[in-house]
Image: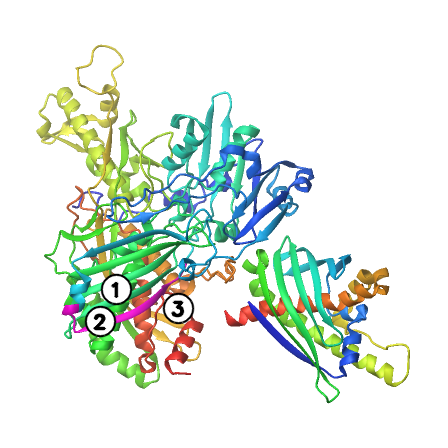
């Protein structure tokens, strides 16, 4: 299944790319993440709790990042498995400088989903995905706004609070991030996990629409 | 042939107990020390198994054992064919790749078991499944029927050169000649969807091994106790007599429960012996969708050769049939499609050809209708297309081509699922068609009602379709009828029941022969401990085949009773009658002996017995027809389509059927009603959808829609016809699938008629509001 999507960030490309290096902000875009480990160069393993209607359980994911061209693009390959089924996908993310101070984020990829996630969760995943994607971008927009404001005022402290709906997500992100946030590779991963999750959810969303 | 009971609508004898909840279903059975099973199923439709780690699962407290293919050793091998191959058909080719009880090395459909857990409770067993880790190497899934046969397609069975599972071509007359004679050849392509049996009660099994008696008891809601017993005994090296299979009350079969040598019965019988504990497994609904066999998926390329006046000269139908990952049921479904394509009409030249295709989907075996409705659908759709192109009415073109009432027996030249040439034994198709037109008030609707409603902006339409149902096929069934010393009668048969009222209808047949009250006849079905011969519940053959065997056995008992009573009463047999539970001299009613006393005397305890005499008022009989009896009928439907939502409302349906002598007309009506509802599901709601990776995305009743009581036609009129079958003494034909067969045909026609101004034409048997919308948009060129 093919999937694609885009979102315009109200800020320059470097700032957007940089923002994705802040795990606290980015992980707040997606709740449920439990752990994250680097197992090899550009290869990571993580665990996430998934709950979609009657389908729930933990998901272990393997993620490979390739073709990193900072601050323009990268390719993500994710292979997640767990009691609710599996998800396997390849996605390419691009950040395009629109020349007017905004950045267009584009993603396209291919996704396979199986097990209960597909056979039972399919219908629920549709609305869950809609909510999550909307929330994720809301969080990211606000985060970017806060970062740009801090930069303008020369402040070291970024005054950003995720919206209340995502407080849980932020807490999970903090727990998850723990001591790992200082490691650059993990920082990179921090933005990739939510993106991949968004990709997965978008994939299902697209499936729902085309079926 | 009417009797005191036969042909009477007596109330179902089994209902009081069912209605008051005083019956036992499979899941009600609890045995001391019973363990529970759960399956770990594949999430992948097609993948190689690299390794399975069950160590964590085995550690879970309460888990007795976790087993993969490796643990069963040589016991694991593909199961036996459930249906013989079509060797009777000239030129037919096939390969057999039968069901694997548990995946070994490779999984071939999503839901295929890779491990089985036995635990103290079902909860623990399922939790343990979550702890099993299977390392898969995913492979590209084979999903598309036509692409599956193209070179370079991934292979479901890598030891085969392609995904082709079989090929059959049958021809009567000459299609080539038909094309020469025709004024017009109309071509269409049709898609047939995939449906579940979706019985209210899922599948399940309980196995108990008595190591002292060396006796196995299996409780299972199977449609064939005999097949389950025989295959289990053979696999475990036991005599058939060491295995007793009992079907408790069963909440519906609809076809899928005919299958045996499935993962559950193969593995659980083995483990119950090995562990020396009773084991229960009961399927949940998701498992039922994923891992209980379902039906079909066909793509038809069809050509109809006609004269300008609408006369059919020939038909050519080429189709692909999806058999899923394995083909234990061989070609029953596509052969039914072939035989039912042209049974209602005169089609002098007919060429029918199909390829059976392996895919990474669930195994295909019959579901009520079993391929018949697709033959009917193709033919009815082609007639609609011809009517459209020739500017005729759907009624006119049908009337012109229907087989006349004097055509029977009609030899079709097409070999069917019972491997003999299909013969239409009896019938009167023009009359049933005419009766349908009258009941649906076709002319009045088209000439008066429809124009008026259309003027009000209502999208109302009418359709009419014909169908036939090959029923009551061989090989045989048997029954034993025994009169007890209590004067009551017990009937035992190897046939199994899933709600078809056999406890009433078989009793009616016996009560008429033996002159007893129908309530004094107890019918026992589906217990090999009572009767060990038969084939199973399929092809609408219960009343026709097992019912006739029952009739013949009752006749034998009647002869025995008359002979013995004649001696005792000192009167010639011709002067005796059986009535009111006694044998009496017809003219001197005070001179009688009760059947109970006669039964006691028929089993003398001392003295001598005349040579050639068999004890007891008991007899066994078997019946096997030379070919099946064909029921038939027609249906008319009026619909209203909401132009905004495309929801279809069934305003009125008229259904005329002919199943020969109805043993119990009320039960026949019930079968028709149930069949119609299933047909409505087929036409508008039910669809198993696999995505391009072979994932079933409709594995719950939230996504697999089911017609509700409120989806039945607002007005339903049944019309009855009786042309007795010459094949059996009671003149019976089956009726179990009739209702389901013509509904998609009539539904598509009626909806098309309602949306006539859009010019829409449907090419698939299952519509939905969004599908209708899409078709209409396409027709508008939008």
In front of the other: label 3 or label 2? 2
In-image side of A20 versus B430 (left or right):
right
Instruction: State if disc 2 and disc 3 touch (CB < 8 Å).
Output: no
Number of marks: 3
In-image side of B165 versus B435 (left or right):
right
Is any part of residue B636 visible from this angle? no
Nearer-the-camera pick, B116 or A61: A61
User: What whole-number distance in Å separates the C-alpha atoms at marks 3 and 2?
Assistant: 27 Å
Vertical placement of residue B265 versus B540, above or below: above
Residue B513: in magenta span = no
Give the residue pinned by disc 1. Answer: B379
**Who's the residue at 20% across and 77% down the image?**
B390
Give the residue pinned by disc 3. Answer: B767
**Who's the residue at 52% across and 29% down the image?**
B273
Instruction: State if disc 1 and disc 2 touch (CB < 8 Å).
Output: no
Disc with the residue nearer the chain's start (3 vs 1):
1
Give the residue pinned by disc 2. Answer: B185
When asked about the image quadrant of residue A175, the answer is bottom right
Question: Both on one chain, marks 3 and 1?
Answer: yes
User: What whole-number distance in Å separates the C-alpha atoms at marks 2 and 1?
Assistant: 14 Å
| Quadrant the C terminus of chain B occupies | bottom left
User: What whole-number distance in Å separates the C-alpha atoms at marks 3 and 1?
Assistant: 18 Å
């Amino acid at each position: 299944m093919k999937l694609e999507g885009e979102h315009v960030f109200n800020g320059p490309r470097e700032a957007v790319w940089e923002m994705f290096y802040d795990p606290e902000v980015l992980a707040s875009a997606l709740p449920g993440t439990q752990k994250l480990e680097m197992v090899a160069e550009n290869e990571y393993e993580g665990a996430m709790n998934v709950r979609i209607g009657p389908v729930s359980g933990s998901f272990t994911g393997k993620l490979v990042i390739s073709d990193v061209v900072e601050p323009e693009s990268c390719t993500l390959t994710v292979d997640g498995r767990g009691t609710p089924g599996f998800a396997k996908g390849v996605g390419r993310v691009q950040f395009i400088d629109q020349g007017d101070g905004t950045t267009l984020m584009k993603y396209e990829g291919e996704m396979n989903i199986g097990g209960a996630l597909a056979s039972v969760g399919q219908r629920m995943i549709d609305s869950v995905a809609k909510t999550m994607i909307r929330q994720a971008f809301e969080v990211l927009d606000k985060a970017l706004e806060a970062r740009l404001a801090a930069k303008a005022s020369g402040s070291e402290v970024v005054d950003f609070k995720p919206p209340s709906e995502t407080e849980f997500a932020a807490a999970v992100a903090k727990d998850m991030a723990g001591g790992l946030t200082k490691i650059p590779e993990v920082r990179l991963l921090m933005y990739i996990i939510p993106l991949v999750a968004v990709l997965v959810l978008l994939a299902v969303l697209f499936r729902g629409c085309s079926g | 042939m009417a009797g005191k009971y036969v042909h009477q609508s007596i109330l179902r004898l089994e209902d009081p107990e069912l209605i008051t909840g005083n019956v036992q279903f499979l899941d009600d059975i609890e045995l001391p020390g019973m363990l529970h099973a759960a399956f770990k199923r594949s999430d992948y439709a097609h993948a190689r198994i690299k390794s399975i780690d069950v160590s964590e699962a085995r550690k879970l407290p309460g888990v007795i054992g976790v087993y993969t293919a490796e643990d069963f050793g040589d016991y694991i091998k593909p199961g036996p064919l459930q249906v013989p191959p079509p060797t009777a058909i000239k030129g037919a080719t096939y390969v057999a790749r039968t069901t694997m009880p548990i995946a070994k090395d490779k999984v071939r459909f999503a839901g295929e078991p890779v491990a089985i857990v036995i635990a103290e409770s079902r909860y623990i067993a399922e939790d343990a499944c979550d702890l099993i880790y299977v390392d898969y190497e995913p492979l590209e899934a084979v999903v598309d029927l036509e692409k599956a046969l193209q070179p370079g397609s991934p292979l479901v069975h890598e030891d085969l050169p392609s995904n082709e599972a079989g090929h059959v071509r049958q021809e009567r007359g000459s299609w080539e000649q038909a094309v020469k004679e025709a004024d017009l050849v109309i071509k269409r392509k049709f898609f047939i969807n995939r449906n579940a049996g979706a019985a209210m009660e899922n599948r399940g099994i309980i196995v108990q091994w008595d190591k002292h008696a060396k006796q196995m008891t299996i409780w299972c809601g199977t449609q064939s106790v005999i097949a389950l017993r025989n295959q289990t005994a053979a696999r475990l090296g036991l005599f058939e007599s060491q295995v007793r299979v009992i079907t408790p009350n069963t909440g519906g079969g609809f076809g899928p429960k005919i299958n045996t040598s499935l993962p559950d019965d193969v593995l659980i019988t083995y483990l119950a012996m090995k562990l020396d504990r009773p084991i229960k497994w009961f399927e949940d609904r998701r498992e039922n969708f994923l891992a209980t066999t379902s039906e079909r998926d066909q793509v038809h390329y069809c050509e109809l050769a006609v004269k300008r006046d609408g006369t059919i000269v020939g038909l050519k139908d080429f189709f692909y049939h999806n058999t899923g990952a394995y083909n234990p049921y061989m070609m029953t479904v596509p052969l039914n499609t072939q035989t039912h394509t042209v049974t209602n009409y005169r089609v002098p030249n007919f060429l029918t050809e199909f390829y059976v295709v392996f895919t990474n989907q669930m195994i295909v075996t019959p579901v009520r209708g079993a391929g018949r409705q697709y033959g009917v659908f193709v033919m009815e759709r082609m007639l609609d297309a011809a009517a459209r192109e020739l500017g005729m009415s759907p009624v006119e073109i049908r009337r012109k081509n229907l087989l006349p009432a004097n055509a029977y027996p009609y030899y079709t030249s097409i070999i069917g699922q019972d491997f003999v040439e299909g013969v239409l034994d009896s019938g009167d198709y023009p009359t049933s068609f005419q009766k349908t037109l009258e009941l649906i008030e076709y002319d009045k609707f088209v000439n008066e009602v429809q124009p008026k409603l259309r003027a009000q902006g209502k999208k109302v339409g009418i359709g009419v379709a014909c169908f036939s149902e090959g029923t009551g096929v061989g090989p045989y069934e048997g029954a034993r009828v025994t009169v007890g010393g209590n004067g009551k009668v017990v009937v035992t048969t190897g046939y199994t029941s899933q709600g078809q009222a056999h406890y009433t209808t078989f009793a009616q047949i016996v009560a008429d022969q033996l002159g007893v009250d129908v309530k004094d006849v107890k019918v026992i079905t589906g217990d090999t401990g009572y009767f060990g011969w038969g084939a199973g519940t399929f092809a609408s053959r219960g009343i026709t085949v097992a019912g006739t065997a029952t009739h013949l056995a009752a006749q034998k008992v009647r002869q025995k009773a008359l002979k013995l009573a004649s001696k005792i009463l000192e009167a010639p047999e011709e002067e005796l009658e059986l009535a009111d539970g006694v044998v009496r001299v017809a003219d001197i009613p005070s001179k009688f002996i009760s059947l109970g006393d006669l039964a006691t005397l028929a089993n003398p305890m001392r003295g001598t017995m005349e040579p050639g005499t068999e004890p007891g008022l008991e007899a066994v009989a078997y019946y096997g027809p030379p070919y099946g009896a064909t029921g038939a009928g027609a249906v008319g439907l009026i619909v209203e389509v909401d132009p905004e939502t495309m929801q279809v409302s069934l305003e009125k349906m008229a259904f005329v059927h002919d199943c020969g002598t109805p043993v119990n007309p009320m039960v026949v009506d019930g079968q028709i009603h149930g069949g119609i509802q299933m047909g409505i599901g087929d036409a508008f709601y039910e669809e198993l959808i696999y995505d391009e990776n072979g994932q079933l995305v409709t594995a719950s009743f939230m996504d697999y829609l089911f017609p509700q009581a409120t989806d039945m036609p607002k007005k339903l009129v049944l019309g009855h016809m009786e042309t007795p079958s010459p094949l059996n003494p009671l003149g019976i034909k089956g009726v179990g699938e009739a209702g389901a067969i013509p509904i998609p045909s009539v539904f598509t026609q009626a909806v098309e008629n309602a949306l006539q101004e859009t010019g829409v034409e449907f090419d698939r048997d299952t519509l939905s509001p969004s599908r209708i919308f899409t078709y209409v948009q396409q027709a508008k060129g939008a």
